[in-house]
């Protein structure tokens, strides 16, 4: 028995040393990245903001994984019908809290997609309390994560939903998933889940999609590094590419006729821009 205890103690000591070495490496990497950000480029306020994001991610690292279901695509004429959210701690890879609630609507033109009949949204539920609890989850989070965040964020601050003033990370556009997962540049939630061995049992309900993302994050050993890169400042660029080579832009995650009409475009950090196989032009939509 004494021998087995001794073996256990040795293994436990080795595990603790391994964890300590990993944390030391991460601290070293974050310090170096912070210095790089502060030295890079001429926009000092942007660089300081990036360094601050690194510190927040390392020391606090509560993120709110969020998803919405809606009655359509236009936030001026359609409505958000469901909100799902999971409060996730990055350092411990743990779910701290989760919630979903329905918002009452008269009709749901997207029922065939999200399978939410309008009549069940009007059943009695503690909606006021649900929204207040959702606000409390937002308040204790450092960042918001959503798959296709550009779509989800536009529903907040409208109708009954509160505005969200936190920084958003898009798990589809902002995170560069590891090459060995063989994912598309803009993967679907389903493909992302399957790539990380997460079983897919349902789709197009808000909390379900949040669960998939949380399970992916639990399995992602390099999550901190991916989030750090996702928080880097980005610029909107237009692909300077011929019609015959448009497939290169599509593979690189550029979208046709969206942010820039009549062009392939996407937002990217400057490090990834330098890796592109074709030239791009920075675009300022305010001009």
Image (spheres, grey):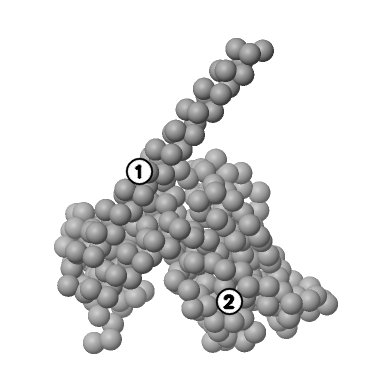
Horizontal side, residue 158 vs residue 252: left or right:
right
Q: Quadrant of the N terminus?
A: top right
Nearer-the-camera pick, 260 or 8: 8
- From where the camera sits, is residue 205 visible? no
Residue placed furthest toward the front: 2
Residue visible at 57% across and 18% down in the picture: 6
Tell me: 275 left or right of 135.
left
Q: Residues within 10 Å of mark 2 (few under 14, many from 20)?
A: some
Residue 254, image quadrant: bottom left
Nearest the viewer among 17 and 97 is 17
As displayed, is residue 100 above or below residue 158? Answer: above
Nearer-the-camera pick, 40 or 11: 11
- Secondary structure at numbered mark 1: helix
The answer to which quarter of the image holds residue 44 is bottom left
Q: Nearer the viewer, mark 2 or mark 1?
A: 1
Residue found 25% across the figure and 80% down from its top: 284
The residue located at (68%, 65%) in the rendering is 99
Q: Which mark identifies residue 258?
A: none
Q: Which residue is mark 2?
A: 72
Task: Give the spatial CA distance, label 2 vs label 1.
Answer: 46 Å
Image coordinates for residue 4, horizontal then vertical, percent: 61, 15
Q: Which residue is mark 1?
A: 25
Residue 174: quadrant of the picture: bottom left
- In the image, farthest residue toward the right: 124
Q: Position of residue 5 (x, y in %)?
A: 62, 19
Task: Name the spot of residue 240 as percent of width and height, x first.
Answer: 18, 67
Labels 2 and 1 touching (C-beta < 8 A): no
Who comes first in sequence, dot 2 or dot 1? 1
Which quadrant, please, contains the C terminus?
bottom left
* In the foreground, 205 or 37: 37
Q: Is residue 83 visible?
A: yes
Q: Position of residue 79 (x, y in %)?
A: 62, 81
């Amino acid at each position: 028995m004494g021998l087995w205890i001794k073996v256990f103690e040795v293994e436990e000591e080795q595990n603790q040393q391994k964890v300590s070495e990993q944390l030391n490496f991460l601290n070293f990497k974050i310090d170096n990245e912070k210095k790089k950000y502060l030295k890079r480029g001429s926009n000092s306020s942007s660089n300081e903001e990036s360094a601050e994001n690194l510190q927040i991610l390392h020391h606090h690292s509560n993120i709110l994984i969020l998803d919405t279901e809606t009655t359509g695509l236009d936030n001026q004429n359609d409505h958000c019908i469901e909100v799902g959210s999971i409060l996730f701690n990055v350092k411990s890879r743990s779910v701290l809290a989760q919630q979903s609630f329905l918002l009452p609507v008269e009709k749901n033109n997207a029922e065939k997609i999200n399978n939410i009949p309008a009549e069940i949204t009007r059943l009695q539920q503690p909606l006021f309390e649900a929204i207040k609890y959702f606000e409390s989850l937002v308040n204790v989070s450092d960042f918001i994560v959503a798959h296709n965040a550009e779509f989800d964020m536009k529903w907040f601050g409208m109708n009954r939903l509160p505005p969200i003033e936190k920084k958003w990370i898009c798990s589809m556009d902002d995170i560069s998933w590891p090459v060995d997962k063989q994912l598309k540049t803009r993967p679907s939630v389903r493909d992302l889940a399957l790539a990380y061995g997460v079983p897919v049992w349902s789709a197009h309900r808000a909390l379900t999609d949040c669960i998939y993302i949380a399970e992916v994050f639990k399995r992602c050993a390099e999550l901190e590094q991916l989030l750090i890169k996702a928080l880097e400042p980005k610029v909107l660029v237009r692909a300077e590419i011929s019609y015959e080579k448009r497939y290169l832009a599509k593979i690189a995650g550029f979208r046709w006729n969206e942010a820039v009409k009549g062009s392939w475009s996407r937002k990217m950090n400057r490090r990834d821009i330098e890796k592109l196989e074709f030239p791009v032009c920075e675009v300022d939509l305010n001009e």
